[in-house]
């Protein structure tokens, strides 16, 4: 083999060359595994996928739909953040201005509101599918616990967003929710005080729930979703009836 041929093979086998130019179609299990593991878009999937996982069913992609709705809520929520002010004197007026004066404001708010309802609905259906198929059994029991946490966080995310319009429905929902928290054994009073930002509902309450809604809960949900997707991959992909 000549010097130029060796240089050519070295270049073609380098990671830079492989990342820039299309490689031959993998025809054996080893090359297929490498193709999946070395691709930034494919590595989140397992190397092997069960046949039932690619068949269309009545429970098809409930988890994927939940994740898609989370992305929709993120995009619409960021857009609404440009116009919303978490102030007891301005919040309700801001909502009316968003719906009447902001470009695509009414559409964006309705998409955000209905997307939140649908996300709760699809997350619940997704967990019912997992329970009905027995997919919470070993070795997936850890991911079942992560799913329960994600359902709880989804409900909390929806509930904190319910306060932000600062209308009568919001105020009474917060009053009922924080009073329920106040009856928590041992530290109920402290929990209620932290959620309200004082002894009663005020501007501090709105500000705290706004931070929980736009920053704290989404950040925690992203972390647990990453763990959830990672465990799906480690457990061999989407599970079917066991």
Image (spheres, rainbow, N blue to C red):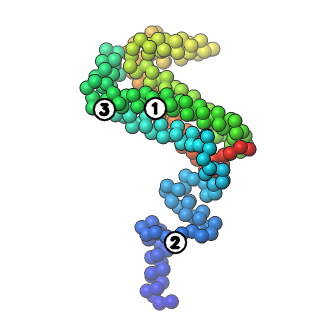
Query: In this picture, is 128 found above or below 175?
Result: below
Q: Residue at x 54, y 42 (%)?
A: 64
| SS class, disc 2 | loop
Q: Which residue is mark 2?
A: 24
Q: Which residue is mark 1?
A: 115
Q: Quadrant of the C terminus?
A: top right
Q: Residues within 10 Å of mark 2 (few under 14, many from 20)?
A: few
Q: With 218 as the anchor, is 233 left or right in this view?
A: right
Residue 121 spot, x, y in % from top left: 55, 30
**Which of pointers 3 and 2 lies earlier in the amino acid sequence?**
2
| Distance between mark 1 and mark 3 Cα atoms | 16 Å
Asked if marks 1 and 3 touch (Cβ < 8 Å), the reply is no
Q: Which residue is mark 3?
A: 104
**Which of pointers 1 and 2 lies earlier in the amino acid sequence?**
2
Query: In this picture, is 162 found above or below 140?
Result: above
Which image quadrant for residue 21? bottom left
Asked if marks 1 and 2 touch (Cβ < 8 Å), the reply is no
Q: Nearer the viewer, residue 100 or 191?
A: 100
| SS class, disc 3 | loop
| Distance between mark 1 and mark 2 Cα atoms | 42 Å
């Amino acid at each position: 083999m000549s010097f130029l041929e060796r240089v050519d093979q070295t270049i073609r086998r380098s990671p830079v060359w492989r990342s820039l130019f299309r490689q031959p179609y993998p025809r054996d299990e080893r090359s297929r595994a490498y193709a999946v593991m070395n691709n930034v878009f494919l590595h989140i999937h397992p190397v092997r996928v069960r046949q039932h996982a690619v068949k269309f069913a009545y429970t098809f992609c409930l988890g994927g739909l939940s994740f898609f709705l989370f992305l929709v809520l993120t995009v619409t929520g960021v857009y609404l953040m440009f116009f919303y002010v978490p102030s007891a004197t301005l919040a309700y007026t801001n909502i009316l201005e968003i719906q009447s004066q902001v470009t695509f404001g009414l559409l964006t708010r309705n998409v955000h509101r209905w997307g939140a309802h649908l996300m709760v609905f699809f997350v619940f259906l997704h967990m019912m599918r997992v329970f009905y198929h027995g997919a919470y059994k070993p070795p997936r029991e850890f991911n079942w616990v992560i799913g329960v946490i994600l359902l709880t966080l989804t409900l909390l995310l929806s509930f904190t967003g319910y306060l932000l319009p600062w209308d009568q429905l919001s105020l009474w929902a917060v009053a009922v929710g924080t009073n329920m928290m106040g009856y928590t054994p041992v530290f109920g009073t402290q929990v209620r005080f932290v959620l309200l930002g004082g002894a009663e509902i005020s501007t501090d309450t709105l500000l705290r729930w706004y931070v929980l809604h736009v920053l704290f809960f989404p950040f925690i949900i992203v972390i647990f979703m990453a763990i959830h997707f990672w465990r799906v991959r480690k457990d061999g992909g989407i599970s079917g009836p066991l």
